[in-house]
Image: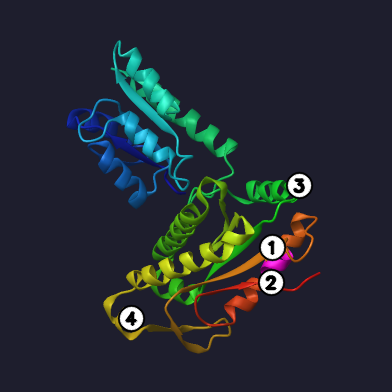
Amino acid sequence: MRRERILIIDDDPDIRDVLDLSLSEHYTVLMASNGKEGLEAVKAKNPDLIITDYNMPVMNGAEFCRQLRRDILFRHLPIIMLTGKGETKDMVVGIESGADDYLVKPFEPETLLARIRMILKRTTRSLDANPLTHLPGNATIMEEFQNRIDIGKPFAVGYADLDKFKIYNDKYGFEHGDEIIRGLARVLVEATQQHCGDQAFVGHVGGDDFVFICDDDKADFVSQAAIDAFDTLSPSFYNDEDRNAGFIMGIDRQGNPIKTGLVSVSIGIVSNVNQKITHVAQIGELGAELKKFAKSVGKSNFQRDQRKR
């Protein structure tokens, strides 16, 4: 069973040691000494919950919360803020900055454990988020589809997934495969934010399948930006020998030896500009068809449905 990861951010090594002793029996504990290190650890270690002190050098707890909440990939992570006794103002600022709960130091370990269990349970129940990427999952995706249909304005949905991913997983293992999935999530989020700002949506269907939703006239730019970024990132997931060769050897689904290039990304774009979309299932059917066509190209690309219906 997977152990949940808790990131502790505190500049006091004694506090970090106390928290580690209190939590390590139940959780995998990660450490950072200030908010800046904390942001880096969030992106590298993908924690399930964060405990951060308020007063720290370099970047304090409130600024850490504000910056984390701006990142669509991590804005749903629960945060517990630690404040000193009587520092009511700090507690208020921390909550307003995005902390979900707070504890006043000193505190009983049993109290902290109870708060953690409560918040993790509440987060799992209330958020339809993929545990690997923390992006919204299928229920939220369907809701977003329906919202766009109901609004009636031009929109596009991009269906993205990885090519040659099974062969990579077979050779490098699922942990490395998860890193590629998180890499694709990151480039999709960055591409949509770059071209669409806060109006865009990125969801994680599951496995290596993602969707993004944006204005129709932005979809091609988002797709090309994501492809360019992923193709630049892809070689970093291989060892030097495979990266220099540009391919790896593997076994296909029929058990035959196969030589395959580096992992790439295919995107199929569904739009309501040339056709009327009336239900969410229609989006999924068209997206699967277009994505299949895109995957047949053999390299990173996107395909848009130009047919009028």
Q: Nearer the viewer, mark 4 or mark 1?
A: 1
Tags 3 and 2 in contact by the CB under 8 Å rule? no
Residue picked out by circle 4: 242
Q: Which residue is mark 1?
A: 271
Query: Above or below — where is 112 with respect to 37?
Result: above
Q: CA distance from mark 1 to mark 2?
A: 7 Å
Distance between mark 4 and mark 2 Cα atoms = 35 Å
| Earlier-in-chain disc, 4 versus 2 | 4
Q: Secondary structure at mark 2?
A: loop
Residue 110, how many percent across, how many down?
Answer: 38, 22
CB atoms of marks 1 and 2 within 8 Å: yes
The residue drawn where x is 53% and y is 36% is 123
Label 4 to label 1: alpha-carbon separation: 38 Å
Disc 3 marks which amino acid?
A: Asp
Is residue 47 located in the magenta-colored stretch of the structure? no
Asked if the residue under mark 4 is in contact with the one under mark 3, i.e. CB atoms within 8 Å, the reply is: no
Q: Is the Cβ of the residue at disc 1 closer than 8 Å to that at disc 3?
A: no
Q: Residue at x 72, y 62 (%)?
A: 273
Three-letter code for the amino acid on which mark 4 is drawn: Asp
Tell me if mark 4 has few (under 14), some (14-19) or many (20+) residues whose alpha carbon lies within 10 angstroms of its own.
some
Badge 1, how many Cα within 10 Å: few under 14, some, many 20+? many
Q: Which residue is mark 2?
A: 305
* Mark 1–mark 3 distance (CA, rounded to whole Å): 14 Å
How does the figure colour the protein chain or chains? rainbow
Q: CA distance from mark 3 to mark 4?
A: 48 Å
Q: Are marks 4 and 1 in contact (CB under 8 Å)?
A: no
